[in-house]
Image (tube, rainbow, N blue to C red):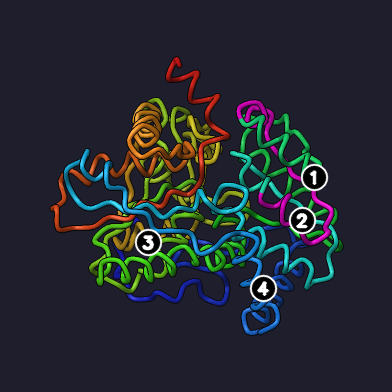
Protein backbone atom coordinates (compact mmCIF):
# COMPACT_ATOMS: atom_id res chain seq x y z
CA UNK A 1 0.00 0.00 0.00
CA UNK A 2 1.24 3.54 -0.76
CA UNK A 3 1.78 6.32 1.75
CA UNK A 4 -1.36 8.09 2.88
CA UNK A 5 -1.57 11.47 4.52
CA UNK A 6 -1.99 10.95 8.25
CA UNK A 7 -4.72 13.29 9.39
CA UNK A 8 -6.95 11.41 11.79
CA UNK A 9 -6.04 10.16 15.22
CA UNK A 10 -9.59 9.18 16.18
CA UNK A 11 -9.60 5.79 14.46
CA UNK A 12 -11.45 3.50 13.87
CA UNK A 13 -14.59 4.73 12.12
CA UNK A 14 -18.03 3.50 13.20
CA UNK A 15 -17.61 0.30 11.19
CA UNK A 16 -14.25 -0.49 12.74
CA UNK A 17 -12.05 0.56 9.82
CA UNK A 18 -8.59 2.10 10.17
CA UNK A 19 -8.39 3.45 6.63
CA UNK A 20 -8.54 0.30 4.44
CA UNK A 21 -7.83 -2.02 7.39
CA UNK A 22 -9.89 -3.58 10.16
CA UNK A 23 -13.61 -4.26 9.79
CA UNK A 24 -15.63 -7.27 10.83
CA UNK A 25 -15.21 -10.51 8.84
CA UNK A 26 -17.00 -13.14 10.92
CA UNK A 27 -19.82 -15.70 10.68
CA UNK A 28 -23.29 -14.14 10.68
CA UNK A 29 -24.01 -15.62 14.13
CA UNK A 30 -21.32 -13.40 15.68
CA UNK A 31 -22.53 -10.11 14.18
CA UNK A 32 -25.16 -9.40 16.89
CA UNK A 33 -22.70 -10.53 19.60
CA UNK A 34 -20.05 -8.08 18.37
CA UNK A 35 -22.67 -5.34 18.09
CA UNK A 36 -23.74 -5.98 21.69
CA UNK A 37 -20.11 -5.89 22.84
CA UNK A 38 -19.52 -2.58 21.06
CA UNK A 39 -22.64 -1.03 22.60
CA UNK A 40 -21.85 -2.26 26.12
CA UNK A 41 -18.26 -1.08 25.81
CA UNK A 42 -19.28 2.42 24.67
CA UNK A 43 -21.75 2.68 27.58
CA UNK A 44 -19.07 1.46 30.01
CA UNK A 45 -16.71 4.23 28.93
CA UNK A 46 -19.24 6.76 30.25
CA UNK A 47 -20.37 4.67 33.25
CA UNK A 48 -18.72 6.18 36.36
CA UNK A 49 -19.29 3.07 38.52
CA UNK A 50 -17.69 0.78 35.88
CA UNK A 51 -14.73 3.14 35.47
CA UNK A 52 -14.28 3.50 39.23
CA UNK A 53 -14.23 -0.28 39.74
CA UNK A 54 -11.78 -0.73 36.86
CA UNK A 55 -9.45 2.00 38.15
CA UNK A 56 -9.51 0.61 41.68
CA UNK A 57 -8.61 -2.87 40.44
CA UNK A 58 -5.86 -1.47 38.22
CA UNK A 59 -4.36 0.31 41.22
CA UNK A 60 -4.78 -2.24 44.01
CA UNK A 61 -4.86 -5.55 42.11
CA UNK A 62 -2.65 -4.94 39.05
CA UNK A 63 -0.25 -2.52 40.74
CA UNK A 64 -0.56 0.50 38.45
CA UNK A 65 0.94 2.90 37.70
CA UNK A 66 4.03 0.94 36.69
CA UNK A 67 7.36 2.80 37.02
CA UNK A 68 9.26 4.54 34.25
CA UNK A 69 12.79 3.39 35.04
CA UNK A 70 15.99 5.12 33.91
CA UNK A 71 18.21 2.34 32.53
CA UNK A 72 21.48 4.04 33.42
CA UNK A 73 23.85 1.18 32.65
CA UNK A 74 22.13 0.25 29.36
CA UNK A 75 22.29 3.94 28.38
CA UNK A 76 26.03 4.01 29.09
CA UNK A 77 26.61 0.73 27.26
CA UNK A 78 24.84 1.83 24.05
CA UNK A 79 26.36 5.31 24.20
CA UNK A 80 23.49 7.21 22.59
CA UNK A 81 20.15 8.50 23.84
CA UNK A 82 19.05 8.31 27.46
CA UNK A 83 16.97 5.12 27.83
CA UNK A 84 13.91 4.67 30.00
CA UNK A 85 12.06 1.37 30.46
CA UNK A 86 8.28 1.35 30.99
CA UNK A 87 8.08 -1.48 33.52
CA UNK A 88 4.99 -3.45 32.45
CA UNK A 89 6.89 -6.52 33.67
CA UNK A 90 5.99 -5.39 37.20
CA UNK A 91 2.23 -5.76 36.61
CA UNK A 92 0.43 -8.54 38.50
CA UNK A 93 0.84 -11.80 36.49
CA UNK A 94 4.01 -10.41 34.87
CA UNK A 95 2.98 -8.51 31.75
CA UNK A 96 0.80 -5.78 30.25
CA UNK A 97 -1.83 -8.38 29.31
CA UNK A 98 -3.70 -8.00 32.63
CA UNK A 99 -4.78 -4.43 31.70
CA UNK A 100 -6.99 -5.70 28.88
CA UNK A 101 -8.00 -9.03 30.44
CA UNK A 102 -9.35 -7.34 33.54
CA UNK A 103 -11.18 -4.69 31.53
CA UNK A 104 -12.84 -7.25 29.27
CA UNK A 105 -13.69 -9.54 32.22
CA UNK A 106 -15.56 -6.59 33.76
CA UNK A 107 -17.40 -6.15 30.44
CA UNK A 108 -18.38 -9.86 30.57
CA UNK A 109 -19.82 -9.32 34.06
CA UNK A 110 -21.71 -6.25 32.81
CA UNK A 111 -23.18 -8.33 29.95
CA UNK A 112 -24.27 -11.02 32.41
CA UNK A 113 -21.94 -13.65 30.94
CA UNK A 114 -20.55 -16.16 33.41
CA UNK A 115 -17.92 -17.82 31.22
CA UNK A 116 -14.91 -16.37 29.41
CA UNK A 117 -12.77 -17.86 26.63
CA UNK A 118 -9.25 -16.82 25.66
CA UNK A 119 -6.42 -17.81 23.37
CA UNK A 120 -2.77 -17.55 24.30
CA UNK A 121 0.65 -17.97 22.68
CA UNK A 122 3.25 -16.96 25.23
CA UNK A 123 0.79 -17.81 27.99
CA UNK A 124 0.79 -14.32 29.53
CA UNK A 125 -2.65 -13.42 28.18
CA UNK A 126 -3.93 -16.80 29.34
CA UNK A 127 -2.55 -16.27 32.85
CA UNK A 128 -3.92 -12.71 32.96
CA UNK A 129 -7.38 -13.88 31.85
CA UNK A 130 -7.28 -16.77 34.33
CA UNK A 131 -6.43 -14.34 37.13
CA UNK A 132 -9.15 -11.87 36.10
CA UNK A 133 -11.71 -14.71 35.89
CA UNK A 134 -10.71 -15.99 39.34
CA UNK A 135 -10.97 -12.50 40.81
CA UNK A 136 -14.45 -11.91 39.32
CA UNK A 137 -15.81 -15.44 39.80
CA UNK A 138 -16.05 -16.42 36.12
CA UNK A 139 -15.56 -19.83 34.52
CA UNK A 140 -12.55 -19.71 32.20
CA UNK A 141 -11.29 -21.83 29.28
CA UNK A 142 -8.01 -21.00 27.52
CA UNK A 143 -6.95 -22.45 24.16
CA UNK A 144 -3.23 -22.93 23.55
CA UNK A 145 -1.27 -24.62 20.77
CA UNK A 146 0.59 -27.77 21.81
CA UNK A 147 3.94 -26.32 20.70
CA UNK A 148 3.36 -23.24 22.86
CA UNK A 149 2.22 -25.39 25.80
CA UNK A 150 5.56 -27.16 25.66
CA UNK A 151 7.71 -24.03 25.45
CA UNK A 152 5.60 -22.14 28.00
CA UNK A 153 4.98 -24.99 30.46
CA UNK A 154 5.27 -22.72 33.50
CA UNK A 155 2.37 -20.56 32.35
CA UNK A 156 0.22 -23.65 31.70
CA UNK A 157 0.67 -24.64 35.35
CA UNK A 158 -0.09 -21.09 36.50
CA UNK A 159 -3.37 -21.06 34.55
CA UNK A 160 -4.41 -24.39 36.03
CA UNK A 161 -3.57 -23.17 39.54
CA UNK A 162 -5.85 -20.18 38.91
CA UNK A 163 -8.75 -22.57 38.22
CA UNK A 164 -8.72 -22.33 34.43
CA UNK A 165 -9.14 -25.21 31.99
CA UNK A 166 -6.33 -25.17 29.40
CA UNK A 167 -7.36 -26.89 26.16
CA UNK A 168 -4.49 -27.99 23.87
CA UNK A 169 -4.83 -27.24 20.16
CA UNK A 170 -3.29 -29.91 17.91
CA UNK A 171 -4.16 -28.52 14.46
CA UNK A 172 -1.79 -26.91 11.96
CA UNK A 173 1.36 -25.39 13.39
CA UNK A 174 -0.01 -25.84 16.96
CA UNK A 175 0.73 -22.21 17.88
CA UNK A 176 -1.16 -18.93 18.31
CA UNK A 177 -3.08 -18.81 15.01
CA UNK A 178 -4.63 -22.23 15.67
CA UNK A 179 -5.43 -21.26 19.28
CA UNK A 180 -7.32 -18.17 18.03
CA UNK A 181 -9.30 -20.33 15.57
CA UNK A 182 -10.26 -22.78 18.33
CA UNK A 183 -11.33 -19.95 20.64
CA UNK A 184 -13.48 -18.39 17.89
CA UNK A 185 -15.16 -21.76 17.20
CA UNK A 186 -15.99 -22.09 20.91
CA UNK A 187 -17.40 -18.54 20.92
CA UNK A 188 -19.59 -19.17 17.85
CA UNK A 189 -21.08 -22.20 19.68
CA UNK A 190 -21.42 -20.59 23.11
CA UNK A 191 -21.76 -16.86 22.42
CA UNK A 192 -24.97 -16.46 24.43
CA UNK A 193 -23.32 -17.23 27.77
CA UNK A 194 -19.62 -16.69 27.01
CA UNK A 195 -17.41 -13.72 26.23
CA UNK A 196 -14.23 -14.10 24.18
CA UNK A 197 -11.44 -12.05 25.80
CA UNK A 198 -9.26 -11.53 22.74
CA UNK A 199 -5.73 -10.77 23.87
CA UNK A 200 -4.30 -8.49 21.21
CA UNK A 201 -5.28 -5.45 19.14
CA UNK A 202 -6.61 -7.51 16.25
CA UNK A 203 -9.65 -9.59 15.35
CA UNK A 204 -13.05 -8.20 14.31
CA UNK A 205 -14.33 -4.78 15.37
CA UNK A 206 -14.64 -3.68 18.19
CA UNK A 207 -11.70 -5.75 19.59
CA UNK A 208 -8.84 -3.64 18.14
CA UNK A 209 -10.43 -0.53 19.64
CA UNK A 210 -11.26 -2.11 23.02
CA UNK A 211 -7.83 -3.68 23.50
CA UNK A 212 -6.07 -0.46 22.46
CA UNK A 213 -8.15 1.62 24.86
CA UNK A 214 -7.55 -0.68 27.84
CA UNK A 215 -3.81 -0.79 27.03
CA UNK A 216 -3.47 2.97 26.50
CA UNK A 217 -2.88 3.35 30.23
CA UNK A 218 0.73 2.42 29.32
CA UNK A 219 1.23 5.48 27.11
CA UNK A 220 -0.75 7.84 29.33
CA UNK A 221 1.37 6.91 32.34
CA UNK A 222 4.63 7.04 30.37
CA UNK A 223 3.72 10.52 29.15
CA UNK A 224 3.00 11.79 32.66
CA UNK A 225 6.11 10.11 34.10
CA UNK A 226 8.56 11.40 31.47
CA UNK A 227 7.19 14.95 31.78
CA UNK A 228 7.70 14.74 35.53
CA UNK A 229 11.24 13.37 35.23
CA UNK A 230 12.54 15.26 32.18
CA UNK A 231 10.06 18.15 31.71
CA UNK A 232 9.61 17.18 28.04
CA UNK A 233 8.36 14.38 25.79
CA UNK A 234 10.68 11.59 24.57
CA UNK A 235 12.22 11.60 21.11
CA UNK A 236 11.53 7.90 20.44
CA UNK A 237 9.19 5.15 21.64
CA UNK A 238 10.13 1.49 21.02
CA UNK A 239 7.95 -1.60 21.49
CA UNK A 240 7.70 -5.13 20.09
CA UNK A 241 4.81 -5.92 17.75
CA UNK A 242 3.08 -9.29 17.65
CA UNK A 243 -0.63 -8.65 17.31
CA UNK A 244 0.28 -5.24 18.65
CA UNK A 245 -1.37 -4.59 22.02
CA UNK A 246 1.60 -3.44 24.11
CA UNK A 247 2.92 -1.25 21.30
CA UNK A 248 -0.39 0.44 20.44
CA UNK A 249 -0.91 0.93 24.18
CA UNK A 250 2.34 2.89 24.36
CA UNK A 251 2.06 4.65 20.99
CA UNK A 252 -1.58 5.76 20.89
CA UNK A 253 -1.47 8.54 23.53
CA UNK A 254 1.50 10.08 21.65
CA UNK A 255 0.14 9.90 18.07
CA UNK A 256 -0.76 13.60 17.94
CA UNK A 257 2.76 14.57 19.09
CA UNK A 258 4.42 14.76 15.68
CA UNK A 259 7.93 15.17 17.10
CA UNK A 260 7.77 11.87 19.01
CA UNK A 261 9.02 9.11 16.70
CA UNK A 262 7.87 5.53 17.14
CA UNK A 263 9.47 2.21 16.28
CA UNK A 264 7.63 -1.11 16.24
CA UNK A 265 9.82 -4.24 16.28
CA UNK A 266 8.63 -7.46 14.63
CA UNK A 267 10.02 -10.98 14.92
CA UNK A 268 12.65 -11.55 12.21
CA UNK A 269 13.01 -15.19 13.26
CA UNK A 270 15.84 -17.22 11.73
CA UNK A 271 15.71 -16.12 8.08
CA UNK A 272 14.01 -14.05 5.36
CA UNK A 273 12.04 -16.79 3.64
CA UNK A 274 8.32 -17.29 4.29
CA UNK A 275 7.98 -19.68 7.23
CA UNK A 276 11.21 -18.56 8.90
CA UNK A 277 9.92 -15.37 10.53
CA UNK A 278 6.81 -13.46 11.67
CA UNK A 279 7.59 -10.03 10.16
CA UNK A 280 4.32 -9.10 8.46
CA UNK A 281 5.55 -5.72 7.20
CA UNK A 282 8.71 -7.29 5.75
CA UNK A 283 7.03 -10.22 3.99
CA UNK A 284 3.26 -9.88 4.23
CA UNK A 285 0.55 -8.41 2.03
CA UNK A 286 -3.07 -7.35 2.34
CA UNK A 287 -5.34 -10.15 3.48
CA UNK A 288 -8.03 -11.20 5.92
CA UNK A 289 -7.30 -13.39 8.92
CA UNK A 290 -9.49 -14.21 11.90
CA UNK A 291 -11.97 -11.40 11.49
CA UNK A 292 -9.87 -8.46 10.33
CA UNK A 293 -8.22 -7.02 7.22
CA UNK A 294 -4.51 -6.26 7.60
CA UNK A 295 -1.00 -7.26 6.53
CA UNK A 296 -0.86 -11.06 6.53
CA UNK A 297 1.95 -13.51 5.79
CA UNK A 298 0.75 -15.69 2.89
CA UNK A 299 2.22 -18.16 0.44
CA UNK A 300 2.04 -17.77 -3.34
CA UNK A 301 -1.50 -19.20 -3.39
CA UNK A 302 -2.81 -16.84 -0.72
CA UNK A 303 -2.81 -19.53 1.97
CA UNK A 304 -1.82 -18.37 5.48
CA UNK A 305 1.91 -18.97 5.77
CA UNK A 306 3.77 -20.79 8.49
CA UNK A 307 5.59 -18.48 10.91
CA UNK A 308 8.51 -18.78 13.30
CA UNK A 309 9.85 -16.84 16.26
CA UNK A 310 11.84 -17.78 19.34
CA UNK A 311 9.13 -15.79 21.11
CA UNK A 312 5.72 -17.51 21.29
CA UNK A 313 3.91 -14.18 21.71
CA UNK A 314 5.20 -12.73 18.42
CA UNK A 315 4.67 -15.90 16.36
CA UNK A 316 1.53 -14.84 14.44
CA UNK A 317 0.78 -14.40 10.73
CA UNK A 318 -1.16 -11.09 10.92
CA UNK A 319 -0.72 -7.73 12.61
CA UNK A 320 -3.33 -5.47 14.22
CA UNK A 321 -5.16 -3.24 11.69
CA UNK A 322 -4.25 0.02 13.43
CA UNK A 323 -0.57 -0.85 13.05
CA UNK A 324 -1.12 -1.46 9.34
CA UNK A 325 -2.73 1.98 9.09
CA UNK A 326 0.09 3.63 11.05
CA UNK A 327 2.69 1.91 8.86
CA UNK A 328 1.11 3.12 5.61
CA UNK A 329 0.60 6.61 7.01
CA UNK A 330 4.29 6.84 7.86
CA UNK A 331 3.49 7.84 11.46
CA UNK A 332 5.18 4.72 12.90
CA UNK A 333 8.28 3.00 11.53
CA UNK A 334 8.53 -0.79 11.75
CA UNK A 335 11.63 -2.94 11.75
CA UNK A 336 12.53 -6.54 12.58
CA UNK A 337 15.18 -8.27 14.66
CA UNK A 338 16.30 -11.87 14.45
CA UNK A 339 16.00 -14.59 17.08
CA UNK A 340 19.75 -14.25 17.60
CA UNK A 341 19.53 -10.48 18.18
CA UNK A 342 16.59 -10.88 20.57
CA UNK A 343 18.43 -13.52 22.60
CA UNK A 344 21.50 -11.28 22.79
CA UNK A 345 19.28 -8.45 24.09
CA UNK A 346 17.64 -10.85 26.58
CA UNK A 347 21.09 -11.70 27.96
CA UNK A 348 22.37 -8.12 27.91
CA UNK A 349 19.45 -6.58 29.82
CA UNK A 350 19.64 -9.35 32.40
CA UNK A 351 23.36 -8.84 32.97
CA UNK A 352 23.51 -5.06 32.73
CA UNK A 353 20.32 -3.96 34.50
CA UNK A 354 19.38 -7.00 36.59
CA UNK A 355 16.06 -7.26 34.71
CA UNK A 356 15.19 -10.48 32.87
CA UNK A 357 12.77 -9.47 30.08
CA UNK A 358 10.21 -11.59 28.27
CA UNK A 359 11.56 -12.74 24.90
CA UNK A 360 8.86 -10.56 23.33
CA UNK A 361 10.19 -7.49 25.16
CA UNK A 362 13.77 -8.51 24.31
CA UNK A 363 12.86 -7.83 20.66
CA UNK A 364 12.13 -4.19 21.64
CA UNK A 365 15.47 -4.01 23.49
CA UNK A 366 17.20 -5.45 20.40
CA UNK A 367 15.46 -2.80 18.28
CA UNK A 368 16.85 -0.16 20.63
CA UNK A 369 20.33 -1.65 20.33
CA UNK A 370 20.14 -0.99 16.57
CA UNK A 371 18.98 2.65 16.67
CA UNK A 372 19.85 4.21 20.06
CA UNK A 373 23.67 4.33 19.49
CA UNK A 374 23.01 6.63 16.50
CA UNK A 375 20.97 9.10 18.57
CA UNK A 376 22.36 12.12 20.41
CA UNK A 377 23.14 12.00 24.13
CA UNK A 378 20.65 14.82 24.69
CA UNK A 379 17.85 12.66 23.24
CA UNK A 380 15.55 10.22 25.08
CA UNK A 381 14.00 6.87 24.21
CA UNK A 382 11.33 4.86 26.05
CA UNK A 383 11.33 1.07 25.59
CA UNK A 384 8.15 -0.72 26.57
CA UNK A 385 9.26 -3.65 28.71
CA UNK A 386 6.00 -5.47 28.09
CA UNK A 387 6.65 -8.51 30.30
CA UNK A 388 9.07 -10.36 32.51
CA UNK A 389 11.11 -13.34 31.40
CA UNK A 390 10.41 -16.03 34.01
CA UNK A 391 8.37 -17.97 31.43
CA UNK A 392 11.25 -17.85 28.92
CA UNK A 393 14.25 -18.77 31.08
CA UNK A 394 14.23 -22.46 30.15
CA UNK A 395 13.68 -21.72 26.44
CA UNK A 396 16.40 -19.06 26.37
CA UNK A 397 18.85 -21.31 28.24
CA UNK A 398 18.56 -23.92 25.46
CA UNK A 399 19.35 -21.37 22.73
CA UNK A 400 22.10 -19.67 24.75
CA UNK A 401 23.54 -23.08 25.73
CA UNK A 402 23.66 -22.19 29.42
Residue that numbered label 2 is attached to: 133
Residue that numbered label 4 is attached to: 38
Q: For the point 66% across and 29% down, which residue is it?
A: 153
Residue that numbered label 1 is attached to: 164
- Which numbered tag is attached to residue 326? 3
Residue 362 is situated, as x and y percent measured from the top left of the image, at 41, 39
Magenta span dominant secondary structure: helix
Other residues around mark 1 within 10 Å, as few (<14) / some (14–19) / many (≥20): many
Q: Are marks 4 and 2 in contact (CB under 8 Å)?
A: no
Left or right, 309 with respect to 57, comes to: left
Q: Are marks 2 and 1 in contact (CB under 8 Å)?
A: yes
Q: For the point 38% across and 76% down, which residue is it?
A: 8
Q: Quadrant of the C terminus?
A: top left
Which stretch appears magenta?
Answer: 128-151
**Residue 150, above or below 7:** above
**Residue 160, above or below 133:** above
Other residues around mark 3 within 10 Å, as few (<14) / some (14–19) / many (≥20): many
Q: Which comes sooner in the sequence, label 1 or label 4?
A: 4
Amino acid sequence: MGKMKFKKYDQPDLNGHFGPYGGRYVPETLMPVLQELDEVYEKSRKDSSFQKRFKNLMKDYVGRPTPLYYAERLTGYLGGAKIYLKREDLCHTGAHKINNSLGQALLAVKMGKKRVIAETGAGQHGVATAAAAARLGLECVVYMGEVDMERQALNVIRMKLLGTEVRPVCAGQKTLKEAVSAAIRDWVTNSRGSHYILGSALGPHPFPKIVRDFQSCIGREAREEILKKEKRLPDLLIACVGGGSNSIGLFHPFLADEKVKMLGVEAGGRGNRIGEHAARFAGGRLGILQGTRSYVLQDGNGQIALTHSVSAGLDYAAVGPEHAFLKDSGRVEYTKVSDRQALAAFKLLSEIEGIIPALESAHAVAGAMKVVPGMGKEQMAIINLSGRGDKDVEQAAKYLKM
